[in-house]
Image (cartoon, helix red, strand yellow):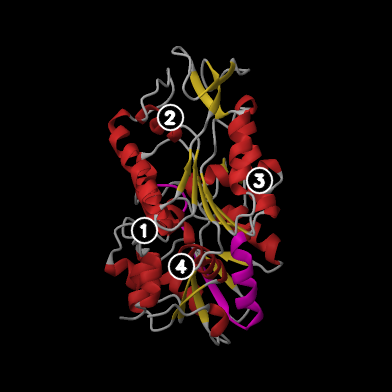
Amino acid sequence: MSITYLENIDVRDKRLLIRVDYNVPMDQGVIQEDTRIRASLPTLKMALERGASLVLCSHMGRPKGQVVPELSLRPLAQRLTEMLGVEVAMAPDCVGSEVEAMAEALKPGEILLLENLRFHAGETKNDPDFSAQLAKLGDIFVSDAFGTAHRAHASNVGVAKLMSTCCAGLLMQKEWEYLGQALTDPKRPFVAVSGGAKVSGKLELLTNLLEKVDRMLIGGAMANTFIKAQGYDVGRSLVEDELLQTARDILDKAKEHGTDLYLPVDFVYADGPKSEHAAGICIAQDIPADKMVLDIGPATRTLFAEALTGAGTVVWNGPMGAFENPAFAEGSLHVAKAVAESAELSIVGGGDTDALLHSSGLAEKVSFISTGGGAFLEFMEGKDLPAFKALKECGA
C-alpha cells in the first residue's frame, strides 16, 4: 500500500479536512513562535489555489479533555488571516451541529479553523464517535501534522478510517520522502549524530541506525554513559548507571556491523549547567571528580568535523552539550556548522536541535529540518507511524 499525496488529487469544489500541527508556544494569548504555522502554509496555499475550501483542525497543549481558555486556537485564526491574506473564520468548537453548519456553508477559497481538538477527551482516546463527528466536516482528509504522526488519535487515525479519500499534505510528504530516503536509500557515507541528555530515550534509534550508517557520532550528556561504560569516572556528570551494560552492547554492535562509532575525547567542564564560565577542559579519561562535563572539547570538535567531512547523508538529533548556556554552546555550534557545510544531504530533528540551528542562523543551510520530535525519533527507529499507516489504509 502506498500513500496518496495532495498534489495528485483533484480538490476543486471539495471541502478538505486538514489536520495541521499548530501546537505553538503561547503566552497570555500571544503566539511566541510560529514555525509550525509557517510550515503548514504551502499545503494551505496549494489547496486554495486549486479551488478547495478548508477546515483546519489542531490541538494545543494538554487540556486533558477540558476547555482551557488559555489554550484556545483563536489567536491562530488572526495570524493565519495575516499570513494567507484570506479571512480565517474561527469555530466555537471542533464538533457539533453549529460547527457542521459553518463547514457546510464554506465556499471555495474559504477557511474555517476549529477549536482545540483536545478540549474533547475523545481526541486522544481515538474515540469512534468523536472521529465520526470530525469526518462529517470534510469530503477529503488531508494529514499534514507530522509532529503528532506517532500518536493514534481521532484526528489523524480515526477520521482516516471513515473517509473514502485521504492524502498527505506537502509537509507530511516532505517528511516521508526525506526521512524515508535516509533510511532506505541514503547517499553515502551515511553519518548519524546523536546527542541530548539520555541514552534511554534513544536506545532504539541508536540500535536501528547502527545497522544502516557508516559512522555514528555520540555527544551530549548521553556520551557520559558510554565513557563510564568503558571504565572511566565521569565525576558529577549526568549518567545512566542502569544502562552501562547497554552502552557496552551498543559499542560491541558497532564493531560487529563495521560502523565507526565516535565518542568525545575531551570535554569542557564546570560546577553545573548554570555556571557563568567553564572551569576547564579535560580528556575523557580524566574528568574531575567534583565537576560536570557540559560540552564537547576542542579536540572532539575537530574529530567530529572530520568525521562529517564528505558525508553523503547526515541525520542529527540532539545537541552536544548544555547549549542553552553560551558558556557550553561552542561544541553544538561547531557540529552544526560542520553538518551545514559538509553534508550533501542533512536532516535534522528534535526541538533542541531545531532551536540551536535557528538561533545560530544555520537553519537555512541544512537540507531539511523535521517538524517532529517524538515522531522523528520513532520514524528513524524504523517504526510504522500510526498517521502514515492510517493514510495507507484510508477508508479500510
Label 4 or label 3, whichever comes before in sequence order: 4
Per the image, the residue denoted by label 1 is 151
Image marks 2 and 1: residues in contact by CB distance under 8 Å: no
SS of the residue under disc 4: helix
Q: Give the range drawn in magenta.
A: 39-62
Residue 281 x, y percent position in the rendering: 59, 20
Residue 120 x, y percent position in the rendering: 35, 57
110 on left or right of 2: right
- Distance, label 2 to label 4, CA atoms, is 31 Å
- Distance, label 2 to label 1, CA atoms, is 31 Å
- Distance, label 3 to label 2, CA atoms, is 22 Å
- Distance, label 1 to label 3, CA atoms, is 33 Å
Q: Nearer the viewer, residue 269 or 394?
A: 269
How many C-alpha atoms fall within 10 Å of the one at disc 3: few (<14), some, or many (≥20)?
some
- Distance, label 4 to label 3, CA atoms, is 24 Å
Label 2 or label 4, whichever comes before in sequence order: 4
Instruction: Tell whether position 43 is magenta.
Output: yes
* Residue sitting at the far top: 290
Q: Which of 209 and 322 is in front in this view?
A: 209
SS of the residue under disc 2: helix
Q: Please determine whether, in this image, residue 270 is positioned above or below residue 216.
A: above
Q: Which mark is residue 224?
A: 2
Which residue sits at x=49%, y=25%? Answer: 284
- Distance, label 1 to label 4, CA atoms, is 23 Å
User: If the image is split into quadrants, where does the N terminus sit?
Assistant: bottom left
82 on left or right of 243: right
Per the image, the residue denoted by label 3 is 338
Nearer to us: label 1 or label 3: 3
The amino acid sitting under disc 3 is Ala
Label 1 or label 3, whichever comes before in sequence order: 1
Per the image, the residue denoted by label 4 is 184
